[in-house]
Image: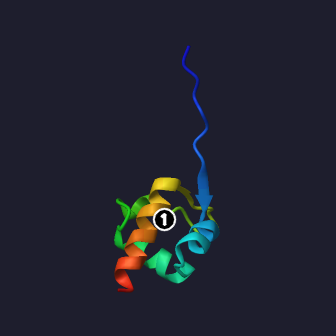
């Protein structure tokens, strides 16, 4: 028997807290396509963005590399 386990997602606020990114930098990177197709993140004003744990980890690595 196979069970599907819910995938944990993080909000933009959680990603910023965990990675040290500012919300402005996160928004800029998403619009530049750092995590793939930018249209995925342009869902309109006030839309909640959700990130996988892996995406948050990638953003954290990129932030550390950008600041070194």
Q: Is residue 57 left or right of residue 15?
A: left
Judged from the image, the secondary structure of the residue bearing numbered disc 1 is loop
Count of all numbered marks drawn on residues in the image? 1
Q: Name the spot of residue 67 as percent of width and height, x first.
A: 39, 86
Name the residue beneath numbered marker 1: 42
Quadrant position of the N terminus in the picture: top right
Residue 25 in view: yes
Q: Quadrant of residue 2?
A: top right
Q: Name the spot of residue 41 as percent of width and height, x first.
A: 48, 63
Q: Is residue 14 left or right of residue 54?
A: right
At a point 41% along the width and 63% down the height, the residue shown is: 58
Q: Name the spot of residue 27 as percent of width and height, x first.
A: 49, 75
Residue 30 in view: no
Closer-to-camera residue (42/33): 33
Task: Give the residue furthest to the bottom.
Answer: 68
Q: Is residue 37 left or right of residue 7?
A: left
At a point 57% along the width and 61% down the height, the residue shown is: 49
Q: Name the spot of residue 24 as percent of width and height, x first.
A: 52, 82
Q: Quadrant of residue 68?
A: bottom left
Up-down: is 20 above or below 34?
below
Up-down: is 43 above or below 22?
above
Closer-to-camera residue (41/26): 26
At a point 61% along the width and 73% down the height, the residue shown is: 17
Mark 1, Cα crowd under 10 Å, few <14 / some 14-19 / many 20+, is few
At a point 44% along the width and 78% down the height, the residue shown is: 28
């Amino acid at each position: 028997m196979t069970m599907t386990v819910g995938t944990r997602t993080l909000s933009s606020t959680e990603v910023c807290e965990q990675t040290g990114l500012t919300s402005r930098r996160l928004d800029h990177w998403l619009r530049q396509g750092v995590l793939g197709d930018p249209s995925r993140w342009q869902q309109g004003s006030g839309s909640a963005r959700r990130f996988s744990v892996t995406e948050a980890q990638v953003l954290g690595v990129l932030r550390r590399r950008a600041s070194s």
